[in-house]
Structures are given as structure tokens and as C-alpha cells.
């Protein structure tokens, strides 16, 4: 017999208690089995802090879900899940039988309408599976409030798959904040789900569900029991707004003079002066720096992996050479390189004009009369000297430049990188995961591997690049469906690579 919303609502007063003794400090948000912030299966009125990225794997019979969520705005949480409906075949008969159980992709969203305060609860409005097949579509509003210091109480109302009132309590004891005990009223209408008879959801009862959870840093685990079924949720929460996860895109601070300048004659007699200038540049992140004094011209060859705009990198180098180079230098020549190959050469024939430009006394147009820029690129990429010069000074905004460069860094879950001043480097990835979905031979395949890459710079223009990849665990090699590529000379079937062995 299916419970009505009114019958379900009568259980809530026993679970919720009286909303008294309000306290202002919120409890940390935790994920539900859908990936949205919530209790066990039901959502609550909270969202994760801005910049939080979560991944997880949950089980709520008969559903196994791989999910992810992110709070990339202060009040908006988005999540996605890939759900396997256990024991419900995706195809009838033998056709595509290897695909296995029925799968569904769903996208959810939650908007925080009101932040929790001393007297008012956190209130959110949310939607589940709002596009596509909408097999698990639902809309709801929920509010959550902390009570007595250790309790967090949630009350909400939903429509469609969430059948009326729902709510629950989370107990997070002050004597052990990593532990939590949960009690919720599960209001999902499982009996209305697709293939409910085949999966067993037809006889699934929601109602009172009990859970226990534990968190250790980024990692969380939760076990639950309700309606005669056992469930669970494993999650990882990554705070992307932490310093170590914020991309290192800020440019180094402008160079400040720390010593007096010497004339060119002293530079010719004392090689330590050139070494000190090279050190000044390397401290700002420049790599592969070479300094030569040829007559009255300071010639520098360098590159910078952290400054995206080449003109700005050249501008910072020119400022440093102007302040720490020979006091009577007649010209400054900067060759900007990538892997020892010159990309462009900037020649400043009048250091006095360059100093006046950095001091804000003359315009880029006037400075351009004493600057020659030669680029190792096709003529179609050329731009006016004035425009390129204006990109040199970071104190004057960020105008467009004729040529932009960037390091080719592939993202990994976890990696360690060492690099010396000559561009030799070692990059170690302890583990990474690649996922493949919706293949006819199986809806979900994985490839877990380790990677090590080494580059050695032996001399000007001479690099040795090497790498080794070791497969830790995978099932992609089990794919037997042939590639549909029409290029017979391209070995594009990844399964063939992995069948060749663990070491590549």
C-alpha cells in the first residue's frame, strides 16, 4: 500500500522535535546519495562552500550512482550523476546484452535562497534530473537549522518523485566532530520509477532511514539502513578555493632595486655582475637565462613558463635589466625562447626612452620609435610595434599582444613536478583515472594508471624527452568491438594499446 503525503507527514513531528534554542553556527554540508548536499537520500537546505568540488559513489537499492557536484558560485550548487538501475536490463533479448543494466544520466541544481542566521534557517530550492529523459525528476524546497550546538534539523517539501513532506536530523557530536548520526524521512516514490518491477523498487519502502557517517579530511563514508535495505555513500570533497588549488596565474611582483648599478667597464672585468642579473631574473620565474654584454648592448635570452603573454614577460625582463644591468648600457636586446627556439627578439635602442616609459613619462607610441621587434612567426601574425610594446608594462592594464604563449601542461588528479633553471624537469603522477561510458560492450569502463615523464636539457637546442606509463588496473582491454575508424594506418583503438601490456 502506498503511503499518502498526509500519512507520511504524520511521522515527521516525531522525528523533527520543536525548532527552539536556535544557534548561529552552521554545520558543514555533506552529500546525499544523489550527490546534492543533504542527509542520507534526501536533500537539505544547505550547499557546500563556494569552490568545493565533490566526487562520490553511492548505493541506494536498487540504484548505484557515480556522481559529482560543484559549488562554483556562492549560492549555486550543480551536480551530475550516472545511475545504474540494478537488475533492470537495458535491452531485451541478446542484442547488446553486454551493455548490462539500464543506465541513466541526470543533472541536478540547488539554489541557496537564504543563509542561516541566529534566528533563521538556511533555505534552498532545488531540482533533480531537470533535463533529458527525466526519469528521476523532482522539485523541492528545504530548510535546515542548527539546534543545541550538535543537531542539524531539516524540513522540506517536494513534488514529482519527492512525494510531499520530508526531513531529518543530523547529530554531529562536539566531542568527535568527524562522526555523525543521521535519521531522515525518505519521501521518494520508488514505486513509480522506471522498471520498478524488474529492479525491485516496486516493493521498496522509504520512510524512516538511519545512517552513520565519518569524515577524515577530504574523504567521507556513510552507511545507512532503511526499509529493510542497506545503503552507502563514499565521497571526496576538494576545496578548490584553497591556496594549493588556485591556479598559479598571478605574475611575479615587479623587480625592486637592491644594489647600485655598475658601468659596463666593471661588467667586463667582473663576471659576477652578469651572474647576479641572471639570478634576479630567475628569482622572478625566468628559465634558461643567458646574459651577454656585447659592446654596449646587454643581450639576454630567456623564457617564462608562468607569464602567458610574451610581451609582458619581455617587459618585466627589460625592467629588471634596466634597473640591475650596466648603468651606461647603450641598448638592450631580449630574445624570448621556447625550448631554446627563438620566438621573438626585442631590441631597445634607447634605454633612456625605456626608463621614461616605465616611469609613465612617455607613451607606447613614442617608445615604439626606438624598439625593433622581430618575430619567428608567419607574417599573418604580425602586429604593430606600438601595440606589442604596450603589452610590456603590467602597470598599464592588459592590452592584446601580437603573440601569446603557454606551457602545454596536461591536467592530472595528483602530480609532483620538479624543474631546474635550464628547463630539465621530472613529472610524476602517482595515479590517474580515465573513464569511458556508453560503449556498446559495456556502459562503464575504467583505466587507472601511473605516469612518469622526464626531460633533460643537454645544451642549446638539445632536449631529451622520455616517459613511462604503467597500468595499475583497467578493464578497457576487454572491449571486443572493433574501431569504426576509416583510417587503416591509424591505430585508434585504445583497447589494442592496453592489450599490449601494462608498461608503455
Image: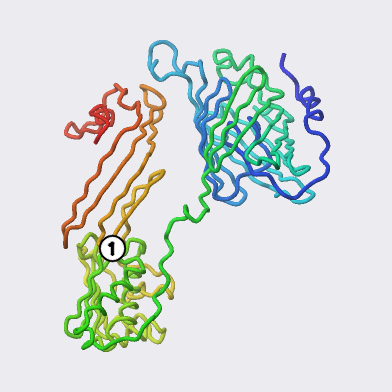
Q: Which quadrant holds residue 343?
A: bottom left
Nearest the eye: 498 or 90: 498
Query: Residue lying farthest top?
Result: 93
As rendered, which of 335 and 100 lies closer to the eye?
335
Crowding at dot 1, Cα within 10 Å, few <14 / some 14-19 / many 20+, comes out as some
Is residue 372 visible to the viewer in this orientation of the structure? Answer: no
The residue where tag 1 is placed is 421
Q: Position of residue 231 (x, y in %)?
A: 59, 24
Viewed as shown, does residue 472 lie left or right of 73?
Answer: left
Q: The C terminus lies in which quarter of the figure?
A: top left
Q: Position of residue 466 (x, y in %)?
A: 22, 46
Residue 284 x/y as whole percent: 36, 69
- Say left or right for 66 vs 154: left
Tell me what residue is drawn at x 33 percent, y 46 percent. 428
Residue 455 lies, in percent from the top left, at 24, 52
Is there any visible trace of residue 440 in the rendered image?
yes
**In the image: residue 40, left or right of residue 241:** right
From this view, report whether residue 180 is shown above or below residue 102: below
Where on the picture, by quarter, is residue 121? top right
| Vertical arrangement, residue 470 with respect to residue 394, above or below | above
- Look at the image and name its color scheme: rainbow
For the N terminus, the image quarter is top right
Identified at 78% across, 33% down, the residue is: 16
For image coordinates 47% across by 52% down, the residue present is 245
Residue at coordinates 20% horizontally, 33% vertically from top-left?
Answer: 487
Find numbered disc 1 in the image and state the secondary structure of the residue it sits on: loop
Q: Is residue 459 above or below residue 160?
A: below
In the shown orientation, is residue 325 left or right of residue 165? left
- The quarter of the displayed image where residue 315 is located: bottom left
Amino acid at each position: 500500500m502506498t503511503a499518502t503525503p498526509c500519512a507520511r507527514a504524520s511521522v515527521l513531528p516525531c522525528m523533527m522535535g520543536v525548532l527552539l534554542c536556535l544557534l548561529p553556527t552552521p554545520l558543514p554540508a555533506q552529500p546525499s546519495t544523489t550527490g546534492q548536499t543533504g542527509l542520507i537520500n534526501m536533500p537539505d537546505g544547505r550547499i557546500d562552500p563556494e569552490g568545493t568540488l565533490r566526487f562520490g559513489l553511492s548505493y541506494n537499492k536498487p540504484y548505484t550512482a557515480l556522481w559529482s557536484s560543484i559549488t562554483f558560485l556562492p549560492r549555486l550548487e550543480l551536480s551530475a550523476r550516472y545511475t545504474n538501475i540494478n537488475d533492470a536490463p537495458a535491452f531485451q533479448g541478446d542484442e547488446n546484452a553486454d551493455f548490462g543494466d539500464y543506465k541513466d544520466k541526470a543533472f541536478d541544481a540547488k539554489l541557496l535562497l537564504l543563509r542561516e542566521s541566529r534566528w533563521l534557517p538556511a533555505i534552498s530550492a532545488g531540482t533533480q534530473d531537470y533535463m533529458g529523459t527525466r526519469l528521476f525528476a523532482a522539485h523541492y524546497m528545504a530548510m535546515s537549522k542548527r539546534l543545541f550546538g550538535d543537531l542539524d534539523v531539516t524540513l522540506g517539501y517536494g513534488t514529482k518523485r519527492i512525494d510531499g513532506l520530508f526531513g531529518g536530523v543530523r547529530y554531529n557530536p562536539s566531542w568527535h566532530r568527524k562522526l555523525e548520526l543521521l535519521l531522515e524521512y525518505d519521501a521518494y516514490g520508488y514505486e513509480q520509477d522506471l522498471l520498478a518491477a524488474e529492479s525491485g523498487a516496486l516493493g521498496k519502502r522509504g520512510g524512516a532511514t538511519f545512517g552513520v557517517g565519518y569524515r577524515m579530511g577530504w574523504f567521507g563514508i556513510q552507511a545507512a539502513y532503511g526499509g529493510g535495505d542497506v545503503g552507502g555513500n563514499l565521497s571526496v570533497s576538494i576545496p578548490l578555493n584553497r591556496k594549493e588549488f588556485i591556479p598559479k596565474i598571478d605574475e611575479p611582483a615587479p623587480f625592486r632595486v637592491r644594489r647600485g648599478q655598475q658601468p659596463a667597464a666593471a661588467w667586463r672585468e667582473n663576471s659576477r655582475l652578469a651572474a647576479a642579473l641572471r639570478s634576479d631574473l630567475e628569482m622572478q620565474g625566468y628559465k634558461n637565462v643567458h646574459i651577454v654584454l656585447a659592446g654596449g648592448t646587454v643581450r639576454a635570452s630567456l623564457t617564462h613558463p608562468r607569464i602567458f603573454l610574451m610581451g609582458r614577460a619581455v617587459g618585466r625582463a627589460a625592467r629588471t635589466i634596466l634597473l640591475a644591468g650596466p648603468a651606461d648600457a647603450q641598448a638592450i636586446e631580449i630574445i624570448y625562447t621556447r625550448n631554446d627556439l627563438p620566438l621573438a627578439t626585442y631590441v631597445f635602442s634607447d634605454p633612456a626612452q625605456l626608463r621614461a616609459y616605465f616611469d609613465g613619462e612617455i607613451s607606447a607610441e613614442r617608445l615604439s620609435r626606438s624598439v625593433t621587434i622581430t618575430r619567428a612567426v608567419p607574417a599573418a601574425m604580425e602586429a604593430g610595434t606600438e601595440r606589442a610594446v604596450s603589452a610590456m608594462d603590467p602597470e598599464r592594464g592588459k592590452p592584446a599582444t601580437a603573440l601569446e604563449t603557454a606551457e602545454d601542461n596536461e591536467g592530472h588528479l595528483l602530480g609532483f613536478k620538479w624543474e631546474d633553471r635550464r628547463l630539465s624537469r621530472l613529472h610524476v603522477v602517482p595515479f590517474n583515472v580515465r573513464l569511458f561510458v556508453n560503449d556498446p560492450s559495456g556502459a562503464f569502463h575504467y583505466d587507472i594508471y601511473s605516469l612518469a615523464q622526464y626531460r633533460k636539457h643537454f645544451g642549446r637546442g638539445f632536449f631529451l624527452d622520455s616517459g613511462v606509463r604503467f597500468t595499475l588496473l583497467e578493464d578497457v582491454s576487454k572491449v571486443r568491438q572493433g574501431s569504426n575508424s576509416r583510417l587503416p594506418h591509424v591505430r585508434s583503438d585504445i583497447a589494442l594499446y592496453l592489450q599490449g601490456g601494462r608498461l608503455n
